[in-house]
Amino acid sequence: MPKFFEDAFSPEQPFLTGEHLRHIGYALRMRPQEQLTINSCGVDYECEIAEITADAVHLNILSSAPCCTEPTISVTLFQALPKSDKLEQIIQKSVELGVTEIVPVLTRRCISRLSAGDFQKKLPRLQKIAQAAAQQSGRGMIPVIAPLHSLELAAERMKAIEVPVVLYETEGGISFSEVRADAKSYGLCIGSEGGFDPQEIAFLQENGVQPVWLGKRILRCETAPLTALSVLMFRTGNLN
């Protein structure tokens, strides 16, 4: 069943306009009596299309209930900036897996060297990718794609997270299986194609971020966050 997000949705006057109208009426070619779901502020409304006019999609609400698909944990992905196509893939799949927020980070070994201003121009497209993935996977919210961060700003943000970790394949870390599974908030810091500079790892450790590793193989930058998210969701009971 198609799902749409609209925080301004009113149960007293159930209709959709604008982009939703174009998507439902023209892209999906939906018709009266077909059903869809509207998520508004964490509540899922199961609706039936009553009428599609030139101005709006008019709906009948069949039922409503709090969305039950969200993970019980908050996960912020701090992703060192990869090439643009890889970032789009990471965003799409991370949203499907239950990430709460994705924070792109510019580190020393990033191949992509966008300025904060240039990255800001890409944000609307990246946020749309997150929205589409949230709708497709039945999420109860649309994860935020943050502006480009420096490593220093990312480390400062991680201080407010209960369990912040950085994936690093060399000695000095612990197995991901040893990361505690009873926390409410997690931060996953993942390198770009070139990984992290040892000085960056030392800096993160000084700021309370624990290095961890995922087995003996080296994962690509687009594989590592999805693997880490999957393992974390499983260990915290969110893939049961």
Image: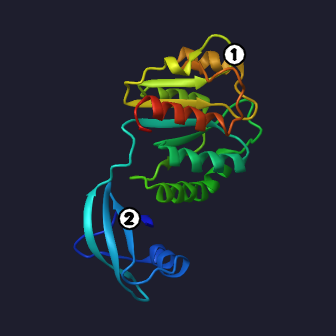
* Pointer 2 residue: 6
In the rendered view, does 150 fall on the left or right side of 186?
right
**At 36% across and 38% down in the image, what residue appears?**
72
Q: Quadrant of the N terminus?
A: bottom left
- Toward the viewer: 40 or 215? 215
Q: Residue furthest top?
A: 172
Q: Residue furthest front?
A: 240
**At 63% across and 10% down in the image, what residue appears?**
172
Do the residues bearing badges 2 and 1 touch, measured as CB atoms within 8 Å? no
Q: Residues within 10 Å of mark 2 (few under 14, many from 20)?
A: few
In the rendered view, does 28 fall on the left or right side of 90?
left
In the rendered view, does 99 fall on the left or right side of 109?
left
Q: Is residue 68 visible?
A: yes
Residue 63's place in the image compared with 68, above or below, is: below
Q: Residues within 10 Å of mark 1 (few under 14, many from 20)?
A: few
* Pointer 1 residue: 170
Q: Position of residue 213 (x, y in %)?
A: 62, 21
Q: Amino acid at mark 2?
A: Glu
Query: Which secondary structure, mark 1?
Result: loop
> What colour scheme governs how the chains and residues are painted in the rendered image of this protein?
rainbow
If you read the primary sequence from the N terminus, does the residue marked by circle 2 or circle 1 appear first?
Answer: 2
